[in-house]
Image (cartoon, grey):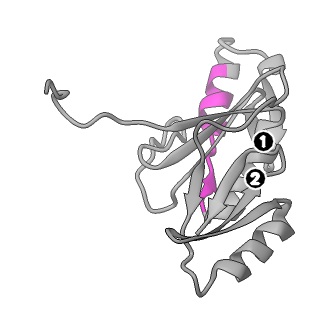
């Protein structure tokens, strides 16, 4: 097998109608931080490399109009851009609505003793229960985020 010279950095990218709302939901759901790109955005605005049409105010600061990301709070990030260098999810605005089942999804693992409490907390954030699964291989709850992207709570 031909492996890369060093492990590759990656992120999960999720299409969204409202990337900032999705970032807010998932930051609260996972205990992550919404990335703060405001320093880079203000620098690029001052240099004329981007315009006011490229940005919005979100989460109390300048943000990219069509992108928002969340990152794990304990992992490194690039101070100049605010971009996480570890576990992160990027939400990108797309014009079309979600039309089918996800081909990839997140599994959250609070453990069986906390599963129902976590499902209730996530419902309070705007998620919905799609179905409860009880199979010989395990038990979990299939949920949908506010834009109907499925995820599981095991």
Q: Is residue 60 above or below residue 125?
A: above
At 76% from the left edge and 46% from the top edge, which residue is drawn? Answer: 22
Q: Is residue 59 above or below residue 52?
A: below
Mark 1, Cα crowd under 10 Å, few <14 / some 14-19 / many 20+, is many
Q: Which residues are magenta?
A: 32-44
Q: Is residue 49 above or below residue 111?
A: above
Q: In the displayed orientation, state which residue is furthest to the top.
A: 48
- Residue toward you, 61 or 111: 111
The residue under label 2 is 24
- Residue 134 appears in which quarter of the rendering? bottom right
| Dot 1: element | helix
Residue 40, magenta (yes or no)? yes
- Residue toward you, 119 or 65: 119
| Residue 26 x %, y % | 69, 54
Asked whether the residues under the numbered discs 2 and 1 touch, taking CB atoms below 8 Å apart as contact, a structural biologist would say: yes
Can you tell which mark lies on residue 20?
1
């Amino acid at each position: 097998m031909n492996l890369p010279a060093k492990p590759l950095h990656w992120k999960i990218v999720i299409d969204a109608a409202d990337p900032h709302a999705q970032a807010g939901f998932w930051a609260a759901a996972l205990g992550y931080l919404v990335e703060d790109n405001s320093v880079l955005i203000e620098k690029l605005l001052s240099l004329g490399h981007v315009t006011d049409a490229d940005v919005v105010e979100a989460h109390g600061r300048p943000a990219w109009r069509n992108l928002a990301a969340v990152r794990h709070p304990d992992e490194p990030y690039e101070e100049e851009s605010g971009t996480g260098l570890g576990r992160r999810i990027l939400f990108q605005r797309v014009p079309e609505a979600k039309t089918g089942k996800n081909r990839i999804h997140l599994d959250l693992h609070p453990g069986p003793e906390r599963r129902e409490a976590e499902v209730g907390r996530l419902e309070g954030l705007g998620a919905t229960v799609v179905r409860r699964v009880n199979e010989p291989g395990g038990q979990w709850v299939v949920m949908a985020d506010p834009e109907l992207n499925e995820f599981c709570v095991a």
